[in-house]
Amino acid sequence: MATLWFKSALLPEGWAENVRLTLEDEMITSVEFGVVAGAADERHGVAVPGLCNVHSHAFQRGMAGLTEYRGMKADDFWSWRALMYRFLDRITPDDIQAIAAQAYVEMLQTGFTRVGEFHYLHHDPMGAPYSDLAETAGRIAAAAGDTGIGLTLLPVFYAHANFGGAPPAPGQQRFLNPLDRFADLIEASRQVLKALPDANLGVAPHSLRAVTPEELKDVVRLAPGGPVHIHAAEQTREVDDCLAWSGQRPVDWLLDHAGVERRWCLIHATHLTAQETAALAARGAVAGLCPITEANLGDGVFPAADYLAADGRFAIGTDSNIVIDPAQELRGLEYAQRLGLRARNVLATAARPSTGAALFHGALSGGAQALGRSSPERPAPGLAAGSPADIVALDDDHPSLYGRSGDALLDGWIFAGGLGMVKSVWRRGEAVVKAGRHRHAEPIARRYRLTLDRLLST
């Protein structure tokens, strides 16, 4: 048993002062507020619940910053993808584990306590399955175990290069599985996750480009009750190709044909009509937004103001892991709206006039839903008795937090902070970050550097 005392803590019912959390068996067993710190209490500044990162391609952490060089042609998402395919052709299972561990350390150090790994790098560089179908899934699980982050594994089904079942491209050979082998991969991944205390499993049909309607139905059946994640409407070319194939836009098609409901997470969903925006919000699904990656790739701007006005649910992800920081993702979401609409505090509401609080609570609730950690019957985990002890302590001596209280703390973290504002993190009651550093940061960084030495020298 351990007791943590905080000057301020964000509880489900709101902010409280002088809060003691009692931790036992990986859970919060009691919450007291208005209490004086005791001799046995470990004292800290500001406590908030850990956030969910709903969309990560961990291996792409290794190529962050390597595509910021303009070629002979105009660059866009598709030229970036060609470079990404060249990078992944070199990666071994050992590399996947080393790069993922570095990414997961950075997630924990910035306030993410669970990650949804959208995992599609299944086979060897020639496209042949490893003798263990779940070899690379096992490496992702090992990286999660090494770092302590919570894992929702989302094995990706990928079969085609474009709408209508077009043959896959050469660069996609490491992703491909027929349905029967993908079903075996799902079961093997389920076994791998048994080594982690609270991991869970979903499925990720990559996109409507990569699956046929019949395959989509079969893939979703492989995760009864589990999360379903899919890329949708990230690029205008994708929308145009979908219209040419089906006469409908991607999100419109999914809503009409795929049974989208609250366990679905549509990643990006950037290019929506007003009708699609309202309809997606009404389904109770989650829009998985990755503002830093979307800006980096020139995707466009999600219609967040209209979507949230329709009570749409959202979550954030780090996608290509260029920069790993939930505060920057949330800041980017709001700033894109401000630039497009030429207004301020766009995503604040009458109920939550603090923009930071509106963003944080939206991402907290939507993230838990998207990663299968909440349901209509079970509220999202938080700083409450009976919840996992996934706790983030902010440095209240930081210049952007000092002297603040209540929602102003969230505003300071999201809009005026930077890396280093997170001081401590507990995952299921275990201290994994202290004084801003992950407990295994150095050995994991050494292994990562050795991996990059080899990858970038060939």
Image (spheres, grey):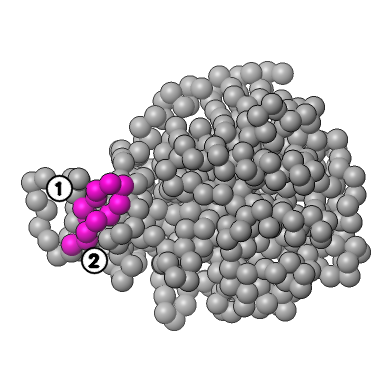
Residue highlighted by disc 2: 16
Lateral position of residue 228 relative to residue 1, left or right: right
Main SS, magenta residues: strand
Identify the residue at image location x=47%, y=77%.
349
**Is any atom of residue 93 visible in this view?**
yes
Classed neighbour count for the residue bearing mark 2: other residues with Cα under 10 Å, few (<14), some (14–19), many (≥20): some
Residue highlighted by disc 1: 41
- In front of the other: label 1 or label 2? 1
Identify the residue at image location x=27%, y=60%.
385
- Could you say where residue 84 lies in the image, as x and y percent from the top left? 73, 37
- Could you say where residue 150 lies in the image, as x and y percent from the top left? 45, 45
Q: Note whether 47 is above or below 95 in the view shown.
A: below
> In terms of secondary structure, where does tag 2 sit?
strand
What kind of residue is marked 2? Ala
**Magenta segment: does it hold 38?**
no
**Where are the magenta residues, as a range?**
21-32
- Could you say where residue 80 lies in the image, as x and y percent from the top left? 75, 42
